[in-house]
Amino acid sequence: MNQVKRWLVWLSRIHRCWGFGIQSPTDYWFVRNVVNEHWPYYAYDELREKNWLRNKLGQLFLRLANWRQPSTMVADEWQRYWQAGCRKTRFQHHVSKVELAYVEVSSKEDWEQLLPLCDKLSVLVVGSIWQDRQRWHAIEQDERVGTTFDLYYCGIVLFDNERFKHNYIINF
């Protein structure tokens, strides 16, 4: 992604900075203290990458693992970030329950495999949603999904259906 497009995405979402317009106190707290937290975490320096997007997403994943504190996760390419956020997490190839997981937007099969393992405390991160907006919107509309956060580069899916369904667009 070139620098001009990156700035255009950021400017088009500028009115959605810092949780502006979010009425739910829980969702507002999540956006302010997990998604858009700007304080330096203890492991940022040792995990730094040259690719700005991979670095930005990695830092988000560290914060998500720190917030969610999963006991087990499916092993993936982001494992070192998840582990930095929660050192007690064990990584396996198969899990019986999803606490926190990553899936690419283009991988419909992986999504369908993980969905039955989700409960109201599960969090799924959907990668590269900007590459397939139709698939991301289908995920948002799924009746099993509760709240979604569209960060442009990735999406975060929560499954608490006791709350009102809401799709937030966040400037990340």
Image: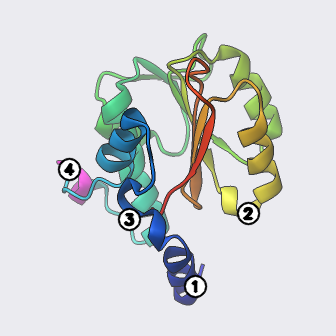
Q: Residues within 10 Å of mark 3 (few under 14, many from 20)?
A: few
Task: Measure the alpha-carbon separation of dots 4 and 2.
Answer: 29 Å
Of tags 1 and 3, which is closer to the observer?
1
Task: Measure the alpha-carbon separation of dots 1 and 4.
Answer: 27 Å
Q: Quadrant of residue 109?
A: top right
Q: Which mark is residue 131?
A: 2
Residue under numbered circle 4: 41
Q: Secondary structure at mark 1?
A: loop
| Dot placed on the residue nearer the N-terminal end, 1 or 3 | 1
| Amino acid type, label 3 | Glu
Q: Which residues are magenta?
A: 41-46
| Dot placed on the residue nearer the N-terminal end, 1 or 2 | 1
Disc count in the image? 4
Of tags 4 and 3, which is closer to the observer?
4
> Position of 52 compared to 103: left or right?
left
Q: Are marks 1 and 2 in contact (CB under 8 Å)?
A: no
Residue drawn 39% across the image and 47% down it: 31
Q: Are marks 1 and 4 in contact (CB under 8 Å)?
A: no
Residue 27 placed where, x, y %? 43, 38
Residue under numbered circle 1: 2
Residue drawn 65% across the image and 57% down it: 128
Task: Measure the alpha-carbon separation of dots 4 and 3.
Answer: 15 Å
| Dot placed on the residue nearer the N-terminal end, 1 or 4 | 1
Residue drawn 47% across the image and 62% down it: 54
